[in-house]
Image (spheres, coloured by chain):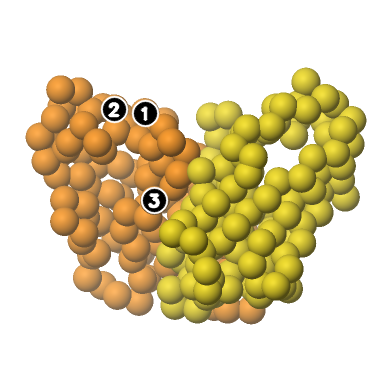
Chain colours: A yellow, B orange
Amino acid sequence: GAGVSQSPSNKVTEKGKDVELRCDPISGHTALYWYRQRLGQGLEFLIYFQGNSAPDKSGLPSDRFSAERTGESVSTLTIQRTQQEDSAVYLCASSLDLGVTGGKLFFGSGTQLSVL
Amino acid sequence: AQTVTQSQPEMSVQEAETVTLSCTYDTSESDYYLFWYKQPPSRQMILVIRQEAYKQQNATENRFSVNFQKAAKSFSLKISDSQLGDAAMYFCAYRSAGGGSNYKLTFGKGTLLTVNP
């Protein structure tokens, strides 16, 4: 596709429910990142993928958070038993690779998650 | 761990004037990349400019330029001839060039830039 696509753009859920957030990276981009942005805050790293592998999961806040990527394409971030503190914008980004160009990330417009 | 600090939560500038956004970082590495990203109200982050630490020459992109002071660990963004479309949140970011598993970008908390007509 032309850019990074995230769905849904907005998600309202009840505390305790599970949610799945989807990211479609730019075609051909091997690296994919997930970040969380709480209101008025900077970007908090969650996880990145190189291909289908996730070398760095250090940013996942708890075992309620998981992510997977299939076919070097779509990625899904799953949050189980959502809590109110999970409310945030979840941003996905992709890049051509992790090498010299790897810092040039292309971002989606994010998913605004609201946990009631 | 690397940290990125943006000490100006908000800045404002008159249209057509120049504004400088500040960023400092902390690292023990000698080779790395620094970035400025812009986030308009649409939420979609856009890369503004990129600097490689091994290059002494400051990066420029049209009206955007940086002042990279490696010894001081400072990386400021200068926007010349400010336009209304420059109004956004600006984030400074750091990434190691050392490889391994350290490919994540570390972001500052951002500076909200307002452009007054």
Tell which circle, 2 or 3, labels the residue nearer the N-terminal end.
Answer: 3
Helix, strand or loop at label 3? It is strand
| Residue occupying image coordinates x 22% and y 47% | B78
Residue B31 drawn at (x, y percent): 45, 75
* Chain where mark 2 sits: B
B91 relative to A85, above or below: below
| Residue occupying image coordinates x 73% and y 54% | A76
Residue situated in front as seen by the camera: B25 or A107:
A107
Dot 2 surroundings within 10 Å: few (below 14), some, or many (20 or more)?
many
Dot 1 surroundings within 10 Å: few (below 14), some, or many (20 or more)?
some
* Chain where mark 1 sits: B
Residue A104, picture quadrant: bottom left
| Residue occupying image coordinates x 16% and y 56% | B62
Give a yes or no on whether discs 2 and 3 share a subunit.
Answer: yes
From the viewer's perspective, is A37 left or right of A2?
right
Residue A97 drawn at (x, y percent): 52, 75
B52 relative to B93, above or below: below
Q: Which numbered dot is residue B10? A: 1
Please report contact status of discs 1 and 2: CB closer than 8 Å, yes or no. yes
Helix, strand or loop at label 2? It is strand
Query: Label 2 amino acid?
Result: Thr
Query: Label 3 amino acid?
Result: Ile
* Chain where mark 3 sits: B
Residue B66 drawn at (x, y percent): 25, 56
